[in-house]
Image (cartoon, rainbow, N blue to C red):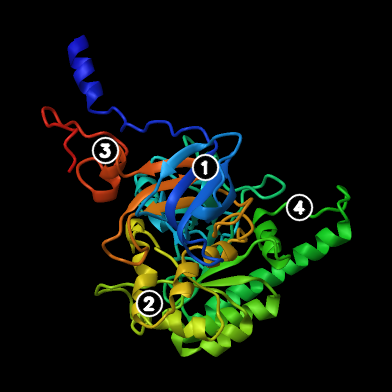
Amino acid sequence: MSMIISLLASLFITADQPAPPDSGRHVFVNARIIPVTQTEIPNGFLLIDNGKIVEFGDMTDWKPSAAPPTIHDCSGQTIMPGLVCTHSHIGIQGRGGGGADRSDPIQPDVRILDTIDIQNSGFRRAVAGGLTCLNIMPGSGHLSSGQTAYVKLRPATRVEDLLILDDENRPMGGLKMANGTNPQRDAPFPGTRGKSASLVRQAFIDAQEYQRKLDEAAADPGKMPERNLRMEALCEVLRGERVVHHHTHRHDDILTVLRLADEFDFRVVLHHVSDGWKIPDEIAEAGAPCSVILVDSPGGKQEAIDISYETGRILDDAGVDVAFHTDDLITDSRWFRRMPALAMRAGMDRQSALESITIKGAMMLDLDDRIGSLEPDKDADFILLDGDPFSIYTTNLQTWVEGRKVFDRSSPSDRLYAVGGPGAGQPLRPYLCCIDEGHHE
């Protein structure tokens, strides 16, 4: 009986995940350094300590210190900031993208962090692709499907290990909203674009009234209105404390978002913007950043029929802050670097392309003071590549988050998630019987 139990247990043993080394003092030498916000260094070094970037520069400026760091020879490799994805659904399963349900089209009280599956294999694919920070979103089948979560891809056993906290130790995130065809269905959902805008307008008017009562109460418990989680989230938006991440495709839908943002004075990041290339000046005038999606295969939806590889270039030329996103699994996170590469093929300049998956995404998440570029005192989030970031032949060798190595392609268990194979689609180690697991070439 004990032998049978042992055999059954072998089927469910979790995949080898060696604990990453403690965050310490490391120097990476002889590497091509792409800081993003400063000039590239053909042969340079990067020094990190206690999870932060200490300095970087040309190898001729490297001076061994009194406290010798662990030295990594990166000859022939490229170091750049960890990639930031402003729109991901990794770790989310089930109806509605894990957020709001069918009871109401506007549910800003729902938190996506309460439904994230921390053991989802998508997190391993993401670090294999060089992603270090995600905006995890609920789905777009509602006018508002809930609050998003900004996460770092640290080693984790619970969702709290991933969350990025603000100065008051509160989880950071935005509010997911959507318009167009996705939220349209039978009542109580809207049936038209006009009704969609009307419902959103009324929700914000209600939030303004709730905020007025809060202001009048001046924190006096006897005067405070009855607590309303839905209103609290919308008031955070009205106060500028929570940015709206808005799914929108068609040019008229984009303009409706901008109209509402102007009417209620809330901050917004436009997501997808398939028709954004048609109205670049209007978007630029509104000062709205754009998180753009590109696809290179047939399919999609009617309202995205005019999607263009040139969107990034056209918006960038108009002065719009542009980032790209995966919408994982629309684009597998392992291929994230292809998004700006495709935009470059359509005319986007290299510097803007680099910024679009690093510092511009960080700006859209209010995190550009922590991540998105290689600068002293920023988090030591970076990747090591074996070639140029925009070459299809380049692979990600290592991913570091806050000074800890979280992915190493030379490790068979990590490489599995980079290249795929039995076991890569689930967090359980496959039972391979007599197959030599050490042969991974």
SS under mark 1: loop
- Which residue is under mark 1? 403
- Name which residue type carries label 1: Gly
Q: Earlier in the sequence, mark 4 or mark 2?
A: 4
Residue 31 falls in image quadrant: bottom left
The extreme front residue here reads 60
Do the residues under discs 3 and 4 have CB atoms within 8 angstroms? no
- Relative image position of residue 97 (x, y in whole percent): 42, 56
Q: Earlier in the sequence, mark 1 or mark 3?
A: 1
CA separation, marks 4 and 1? Answer: 45 Å
Q: Give the label on residue 412, or none.
A: 3
Q: Residue at x 48, y 73 (%)?
A: 351
Q: Earlier in the sequence, mark 3 or mark 4?
A: 4
SS under mark 3: helix
Q: Residue at x 71, y 67 (%)?
A: 238
- Name which residue type carries label 4: Glu
- Name which residue type carries label 3: Pro
Q: Give the label on residue 344, or none.
A: 2
